[in-house]
């Protein structure tokens, strides 16, 4: 008898879960389920909240760099500029002819292990320029019009 009592108690406490979809239905309180006079009050409260402006954040006081930091920044800027100029000059002298047109079948490696290769495209009148970083990421190929042929 005791086993039956435990079984009945256990079955009565374990209920099935019933559920429905949770769907939100917007209900305007001035029309559905509320006092129609509340609409004006709610609108006035919303307008009052819109009249307040957000507080302006206090701007931090800029810290002036020391003369040593200024010197370090100038040296760094000069070095980066000269490296960029040297790379640009190398690219210009290797990949372009005296008129500024791209020379096919040229290759140059610049700082960081990047390789730029120019080849004649399969499409007549175009040149392929391949940019590669040594196999870490897929290479990028651009197809550009070739130099006009002299007549």
Image (spheres, grey):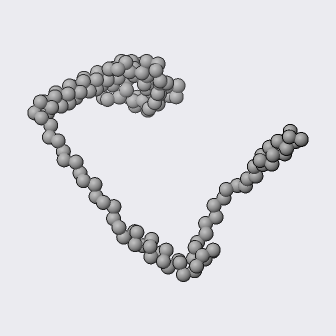
Residue at the extreme front of the image, as rendered = 2
Image quadrant assignment for residue 25: bottom right
112 over 41 or under it: above or below: above
Frontmost residue, 67 versus 22? 22
Q: Work out whether residue 53 can be spotted.
A: yes
Task: Answer with left or right where residue 71 lies relative to residue 55.
Answer: left
Task: Answer with left or right where residue 13 lies relative to residue 37.
Answer: right
Q: Position of residue 99 (x, y in %)?
A: 30, 29
Can you say which quadrant of the picture contains the C terminus? top left
Q: Position of residue 110 (x, y in %)?
A: 33, 20
Residue at the extreme left of the image, as rendered = 67
Residue at image position (43%, 22%) is 132
Frontmost residue, 5 versus 57? 5
Residue at image position (28%, 23%) is 87
Image quadrant assignment for residue 30: bottom right
Frontmost residue, 142 versus 113? 113
Residue at the extreme right of the image, as rendered = 1
Image quadrant assignment for residue 149: top left
Marks counted in the figure total: 0
Can you say which quadrant of the picture contains the N terminus? top right
Q: Position of residue 35 (x, y in %)?
A: 58, 79
Residue at image position (47%, 30%) is 143
Q: Position of residue 127 (x, y in %)?
A: 45, 27
Q: Work out whether residue 74 can be spotted.
A: no
Residue at image position (80%, 48%) is 12
């Amino acid at each position: 008898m005791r086993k039956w009592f435990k079984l009945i108690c256990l079955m009565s406490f374990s209920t099935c879960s019933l559920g429905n979809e949770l769907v939100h239905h917007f209900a305007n309180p001035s029309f559905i389920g509320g006092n129609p006079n509340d609409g004006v009050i709610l609108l006035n409260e919303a307008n009052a909240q819109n009249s307040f402006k957000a507080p302006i954040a206090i701007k931090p006081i800029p810290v002036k760099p020391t003369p040593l930091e200024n010197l370090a920044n100038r040296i760094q800027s000069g070095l980066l500029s000269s490296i960029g100029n040297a790379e640009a000059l190398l690219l210009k002298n290797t990949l372009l002819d005296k008129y500024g047109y791209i020379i096919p079948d040229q290759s140059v490696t610049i700082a960081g292990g990047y390789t730029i290769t120019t080849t004649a495209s399969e499409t007549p009148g175009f040149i392929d320029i391949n940019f590669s970083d040594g196999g870490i990421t897929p290479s990028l190929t651009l197809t550009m019009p070739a130099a006009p042929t002299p007549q």
